[in-house]
Image (cartoon, rainbow, N blue to C red):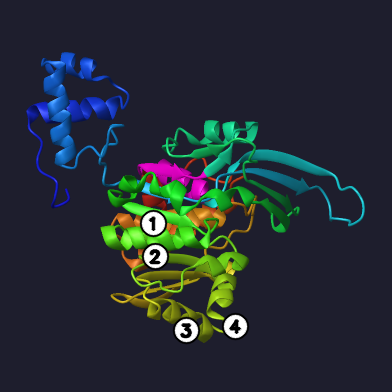
Amino acid sequence: MKQDQQKMNENEELIYRSIQNDPYISQQDLAEIVGLSRPAVANLISGLMRKGWILGKGYILNEENRIICIGGANVDRKFYLKEAVQLGTSNPVRSTQGAGGVARNVAENLGRLGRKTVLMTVAGMDADWEAIKRASERYMDLDYVTTFPGMATGSYTAVLEENGNLHVALADMDAYDELTPDVLAKNEALFVNAGTIVADLNCPKETIRYLKGVSNEAGVPLILVPVSSPKMGRLPVELDGVSWLICNRDESEAYLKMEIETNADWKLAVQKWLDLGIQNVVVTNGKDGAIAGNAKEGILYEPAIVVSDIQDVTGAGDAFCSAVIHAWLSGRSLRDIVRAGSINAAKTLMSNSTVRKDLSAAKLKQELEELK
């Protein structure tokens, strides 16, 4: 409980739990549940607002442990080549379609791990968004998604080789230009009372800067997840106070303006990120593993888990990030945090799904113990 929150009395507790079960419940229905008049219930609700348990007229409950995931939510279209690609002609493929996007994938992973997650993104009022919504609503709160008429929902199209490796990808992410500070500021109370904020770099630069300011002022951890090397320029110049940066070698090279060719270079990159004020850093390097660091536990190397039968590389990076976040929130050591990420990434590589269907907190814990 935050210091400025006061305890609830018995009637307030009953009202709070009723709203938690049905956020759209009327004051008259609450009056019947509590056995008081409607004006008396209105006074109790005002008291809950003063105490910080309800954040506004819409009965936004102050659930401090919620993870707010902000960024991309796309339709993922995958084309699996049946033989070696030939340019300038048609190629036989097998195709699938599903929900994707970095922030959405992270939110689903965390939702499957038992975390309360909220997705904040922008989308079109189209069939693609409806498909994403149907695939996602079981694992995350979608009440804070902003839809725009005439906008195309984001899409990601991947062409995958026979061995599961990515041949080429096409990303239509113009929608996220509308994910502005003005759009997010409508729900600023949600950020201030969140447990953690996770933002991917589909967000515009000014939005990342806004979220950093909100998180620093409210004391809410901010985790940044890059999307690609070209979008590293969206990171703010000032990175002090960012709780986590989870990126890969190419993304580090792009931002830090250095080449990472040796293990010494790799370790130096992690140290450079830490020197910029980020509290915890992981720099992954594919099959070569990951190097992570923080001030308390130093810098350490963790080898990758070798996967001989890769089904699909899509979503593996998001799986890594999600397990890192979950393990950190569970109070794990830095070594275990990186191992959890590696396990979830490896299991996702062996799956045909962007988010593996068998993921749960108990299963990930078991897999981590077996790896030890």
Q: Amino acid at mark 4?
A: Glu
Q: Are marks 1 and 2 in contact (CB under 8 Å)?
A: yes
Residue 147 % position (x, y): 54, 37
* Magenta region, residue range: 103-121
The residue that mark 4 highlights is 259
Q: Earlier in the sequence, mark 4 or mark 3?
A: 4
Residue 212 % position (x, y): 38, 62
Is the residue marked by circle 1 packed among few (<14), some (14-19), or many (20+) residues within 10 Å? many
The residue that mark 3 highlights is 268
Which quadrant of the view contains residue 155?
top right
The residue that mark 2 highlights is 244
Nearest to the observer: residue 89 or residue 361: 89
Q: Residue at horizontal 53%, vertical 43%?
A: 122
Q: Amino acid at mark 3?
A: Leu
Nearest to the observer: residue 209 or residue 340: 209
The residue that mark 1 highlights is 325
Nearest to the observer: residue 73 or residue 176: 176
Residue 196 % position (x, y): 34, 53
Q: Earlier in the sequence, mark 1 or mark 4?
A: 4
Measure how far apart labels 4 and 2 are at the Cα level.
22 Å
